[in-house]
Image (cartoon, rainbow, N blue to C red):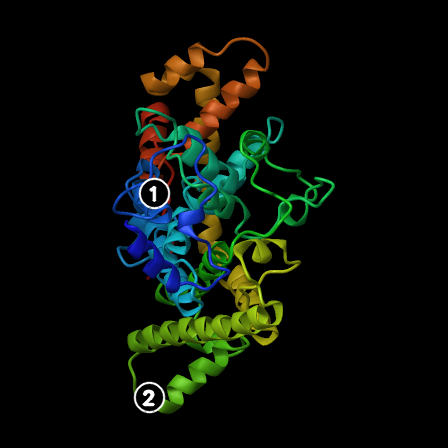
Amino acid sequence: MDHLSKASDRTLRASFAADPWASRGRLSPEPLSPTRTEFQRDRDRIIHSTAFRRLAHKTQVFVPHEGDHYRTRLTHTIEVAQIARALARALLLDDDLAEALALAHDLGHTPFGHTGEDAVEELMSAHGGFDHNAQALRIVTKLEHRYANYDGLNLSWEALEGLVKHNGPLVDQAWQGIGHYAKRGLPLAIAEFDARLALDLHTFASAEAQAAAIADDIAYNTHDVDDGLRAGLFELEDLKSVEFVGDLVREIEAAHPFLDRSRVIHELGRRIITRFVEDVISESRTRLSLLAPQSAADIRAHDRAVIAFSPAMSAADRAMKTFLFTAMYRHPRIMKVRVEAADVVKNLFRAFVDDPDKMPSEWSQVARAINGPAIEARLMRLVCDYIAGMTDRYCAQEHRRLFGSVPDLTMAGPF
């Protein structure tokens, strides 16, 4: 872009927004694009990656063949991206960076959702563990093989920082893990990459990364209510006891007393998203006004997130998560699938560790070349990378190939 275009582009953003013309750069330096900003390039590289395409066949809550209308990781990701863009534009942030981070946030997930992640984490517990954010970082910095000059996607520093820290700082000033990492410690993949390119793990990420993170919360709360209702795991009447959501159900019934159930569900989802988004915009504007940041660095240095729910909406968010945990994620029909899917992942993992030649040649050749120190740990990580990249469908096919069968991964009961 010429200088006039750059100047015009900057006028559309707040002073505290991430500036694509002042990026900290990439691990492998590249010339600037004449037609796209650095963050637009990040977004485009993510969309064209193999890992992104695989999201179409990875579980959100239901395995994809349960029904065409349930969310997959891909449809969830697209919904997160839409909400992140809406928040970024309302708050005068860089919506390209917010969108890129939303599109990348689930790249590291295993087949069969959190069930697969729990299974792999158990198997890798003695060899550095497994964390889907760390796996996403491995994908975009190492495992994607698309470009002649480097491994990974060579994303900008801001994209890598947001991918790793969108939920907040990972360590304190003494480099001790905090939050999710207080007990389990910093994932090895993040620690190793940070030694190559420091991501300031003790600070918050950009406002754009924070917008993508809260958009994820809004999206999955909403669509899990939608999917759970459609699957018959709970009913609209059950939601009336849930703070915030119950009020919306009664509001819809009062305004449209004869509306059919399907439209009520759609209307409920629309209203949940609208109220959450409007709340985040209002609360974030208040926080930004009080902080009066002059740069993205001021956002990172602050001691709390600036893109956030109000206290009342935070309570509503917690109430929804509590309800969904019991009524959906731990529903007997879901748990049946979780147990059987975990067995599929564990069986494959052990089979590939015992005989790496059972993996495709491009993977088995790497396994045979492993030598020197920590051979077992390196082989385990290689198998972990292979399995984490699988789609649900491919994982089931591999289990059938190696073991002659695959468990019934559908929920029992009528839909």
| Residue 158 on image: x %, y % | 47, 46
Q: Residues within 10 Å of mark 1 (few under 14, many from 20)?
A: many
Q: Is residue 366 visible?
A: yes
Q: Earlier in the sequence, mark 2 or mark 1?
A: 1
Q: Tell me if residue 207 comes above or below residue 199 in the rendering.
A: below
Q: Is residue 411 visible?
A: no
- Among all residues in the image, which is located at the extreme right? 174
Q: Tell me if residue 324 comes above or below residue 97 in the rendering.
A: below
For the C terminus, the image quarter is: bottom left
Q: Which residue is at 65% across, 43% downward?
A: 181
Q: Amino acid at mark 1?
A: Ile
- Disc 2 to disc 1, how far (Cα)? 42 Å
Name the mark nearer the viewer: 2 or 1.
1
Which quadrant of the structure image shows residue 142? Answer: top left
- Report the side of 85 relative to 188 (left or right): left
| Residue 192 on image: x %, y % | 57, 29
Q: Which residue is at 53% across, 75% downward?
A: 242
Which quadrant of the structure image shows residue 268? Answer: bottom left
The label number, if any, that marks residue 256 in the structure image: 2
| Residue 353 on image: x %, y % | 48, 19
Q: Residues within 10 Å of mark 2 (few under 14, many from 20)?
A: few
- Report the side of 293 relative to 183 (left or right): left
* Residue on which disc 1 sits: 46
| Residue 361 on image: x %, y % | 32, 16
